[in-house]
């Protein structure tokens, strides 16, 4: 197995930078994301080219990084701008690898492949995350499993009844109408749940009076592992017809082959000034992802014990169509990339 | 190194099932042992064939197992009997591997090889463990070492003086008369200790008045790693002639190459209604196995650092005859098995 | 990567033996160093040849070692002198590998290669460590990194400004005059710091009145990883001219490929009867090595992630000349050794 390199991966939430530089391993590569001192961002290898010390252990400010071991200073473009030793020579080799970086909608994106190709591809856009008409919650968790197992989880939401009572009441799974769709290299999995009791999650949004709803949850995946999840209900009670939406992003970045950075966000367009609702939504979702999904996905990783998913001969069901399509698209893209010599 | 597959291994004590299903890894394979709902037992792979979730994390009752991830329900024969999704299809692939299982004498036995061969072999019988005329204590420990190192320990009891003051007083080793015997593929190691002071262990059984005894401890091994240990003393004082016996089983089941499930039992046919004696015997023996044998065997495993026992050129002594015979019988059986294609 | 075997490595400080035998792994080999009962020392493999138990877990006194598992007793020459079993046979195979050992200057040295070659090489001599005119402090730490990374650290002291404020004040690095010198297979790295403010370290030795000094720190390396470090200052104030010296040894012994035993000593020839100064020097240096150097070297080891130093293409600077020479001398010696068949 390996990773798709010519792709955008989330390196962090923008607001993490309020706490200082972000040091994070992505596709096994240590990276530090810093403010570049000119209003932008820079993503640098988190390893000094001289003696391989982690730069994130050093002083970082004003768009410069000072190596904690021998004091070499680098600018946000990765060039050594100060060598405090001897005659202060700064040979070209004294440069840091930089990673193309983009920032929008509160997300920082890293390009892990050929830098020259970064401009040919736009990171996924999720404008609702930065829409002032939306209240947005977000969170991060580390999953001790391969990222494709998390994708599997998100492209088949039929597990919700069994893992998430808060999201899907008992007995709902049988009524899910599942449909997968592939358009070019994107995969969508549509889950429709007609005429259901309202769920605890949507009671938070709609209040407790609502009885019956049409529910839906549609996952939209694009490689390598970025998912948009449209969840919502239409209120059926006496022709009410209101629609409540909780659009979400689930953005997965491999740390290693067996661990994943999981960045999630959820938005809503009503009841904006309700901090209690913010807190309840954040607690409800982060509990679901951290304490219900994560332990299960980690347990699956352990059971697989390093074996390949398809080699293990899974007994696939109709609701696996979306995730199987995604796995195949990704495998094909990785295989194609492997034919091109790497320069980084 | 590998394991003998066509063999019976202890999967657990029967009374463990009072606490619920037994989830245990045997020869690197995760297994869950359940009541089959019809008075018998079933041993199933502890991994859903759909998405590889551990079934032991799910609901298990009435001879059925419900996968905690997507709610598929399996019966005790491993067949999927309910798929709560879509049209509820249950393709043949939606089946669990089952392991032949036997239960007698308070022990649950698992057959790890070709199911069709299980009926040709009977698990070891230890009827004294279920004899109402015997008081039986038993215990479990995990040993962080290869199971053959534990077999070595049990086929040469000359270590008792050095590890177990409770069992064999100082100076006893030199007087042990050791004899190994191989009959077909079984190995016995006879330890005779004529005219000795009584030991603290047998003072528990006989009381403190006894002075001199003839001691004996005879280990009977059969592949892969099941041992019966007859330990006892004959009282010599003034022609007393009483014989006290503490027959034991030491049944070893590899968890992995470097860890072992160790199930021990000890019986006695006198002083049955003495709960204090029960407690003292249990504490004395479990202390010996857990705090004296286990740390030593684990230390040996660490010193071997992954190397093969014979490749390391051990300086063998006469009292190693039994364990060397057992190692050779086992190696030959494993090699023979490797010539036959596996279907599981 | 591998180790130079025909070489002397420090196995411990002599005074460690006051606490009992020294059990230590050197070049992946477990060794126990004991008093030989005749005023000398013996270094033995810490593994019984019978069943591979660690001898250091047994009774050791009077120059004999009793195996904790089966009670075999060995003398300081590694010969089995007592077998408490059966007829007490002591076949030749019942012998322990011994390692040539030397002791002087408070250090115990082990020869890890062909025993016959040990007499051809003398361990490094550091007579100042046992000179009654010197007050000597010493300490031990374990470094979670390959020993060559520690050598690198010690042959280029320009890191001191960035890691060790106690040793080198801010702004000093730029004024270091660095010169490396190779004589045969020894490498010296000379660091000269003319006309500097005195440092906190040398204030301990000279008192707080001194203003300006010429500083120097000269590292002398010999393979595999033994360093003598001459550090000192010459007082410049009004032609004072006093010289204060803190000669040090930094002796590195690989435990494994990724962990190192680090034995350090520091001497001084003035203010001998000042226990407070002893304590301050010991605390100051052990803090620098354990809490400033070690975390950085360990972080570099982690960043290297098992890769070879030169394969990673370090951007080398003039002050790396000494450590690069040392690495090359060592690599050549290890390669030469690999051409000769081993008998141990």
Image (cartoon, coloured by chain):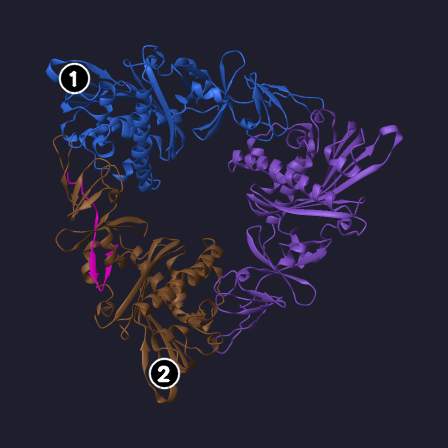
Chain colours: A purple, B blue, C brown
Label 1 sits on a secondary structure element that is: strand
* Residue count near mark 1 (Cα–Cα under 10 Å), binned few <14, some 14–19, many ≥20: many
Does C92 appear in magenta? yes
Is residue C89 shown left or right of residue C45? left
Q: Residue at x 45, y 53 (%)?
A: C306
The correct choice, above or below, for A332 with respect to C283 in the image is above
Please give the residue where the numbered disc 2 appears in the rendered image: C235
Please give the residue where the numbered disc 1 appears in the rendered image: B235
Q: Chain of mark 2?
A: C
Q: Which residues are magenta?
A: C91-114
Label 2 sits on a secondary structure element that is: strand
Q: Chain of mark 1?
A: B
Q: Position of residue A24 (x, y in %)?
A: 58, 54
Does C188 appear in magenta? no
Q: Position of residue C164 (x, y in %)?
A: 44, 68
Q: Nearer the viewer, residue C267 or A265?
A: C267
Is residue C6 shown left or right of residue A33? left
Quadrant for the N terminus of chain B, please: top left
Image quadrant where residue C151 sits? bottom left
Q: Position of residue B214 (x, y in %)?
A: 15, 20
Q: Which mark is residue C36?
A: none
């Amino acid at each position: 197995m390996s990773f798709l390199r010519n792709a955008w991966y989330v390196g962090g939430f923008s607001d993490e930078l309020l706490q200082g530089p972000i040091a994070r391993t992505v596709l096994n590569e240590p990276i530090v994301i810093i403010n570049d001192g000119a209003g932008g961002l820079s993503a640098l290898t988190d390893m000094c080219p001289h003696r391989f010390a982690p730069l994130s252990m050093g002083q970082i400010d004003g768009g410069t990084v000072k190596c904690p071991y021998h004091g070499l200073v680098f600018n946000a473009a990765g060039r050594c701008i100060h060598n405090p030793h001897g005659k202060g020579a700064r040979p070209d080799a004294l440069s840091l690898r930089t990673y193309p970086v983009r920032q929008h909608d509160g997300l920082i994106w890293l390009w892990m492949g050929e830098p020259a190709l970064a401009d040919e591809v736009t990171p996924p856009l999720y404008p609702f995350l930065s829409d002032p008409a939306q209240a947005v919650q977000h969170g991060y968790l580390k999953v001790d499993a391969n990222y494709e197992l998390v994708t599997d989880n998100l492209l088949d939401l039929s597990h919700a009844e069994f893992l998430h009572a808060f999201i899907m009441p008992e007995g709902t799974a049988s009524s899910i109408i599942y449909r997968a769709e592939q358009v070019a290299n994107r995969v969508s999995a549509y889950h429709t749940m007609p005429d259901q009791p309202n769920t605890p999650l949507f009671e938070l949004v709609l209040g407790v009076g609502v009885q019956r709803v049409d529910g839906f949850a549609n996952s939209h995946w694009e490689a390598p592992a970025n998912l948009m999840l449209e969840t919502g209900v239409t209120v059926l009670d006496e022709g009410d017809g209101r629609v409540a939406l909780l659009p979400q992003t689930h953005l997965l970045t491999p740390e290693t082959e067996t661990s994943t950075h999981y960045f999630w966000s959820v938005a809503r367009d009503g009841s904006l000034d309700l901090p209690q609702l913010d807190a309840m939504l954040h607690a409800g979702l982060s509990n679901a992802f951290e304490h219900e999904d994560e332990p299960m996905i980690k347990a699956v990783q352990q059971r697989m014990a390093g074996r390949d998913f398809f080699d293990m001969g899974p007994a696939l069901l109709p609701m696996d169509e979306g995730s199987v399509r995604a796995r195949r698209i990704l495998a094909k893209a990785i295989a194609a990339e492997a034919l091109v010599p790497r320069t980084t």
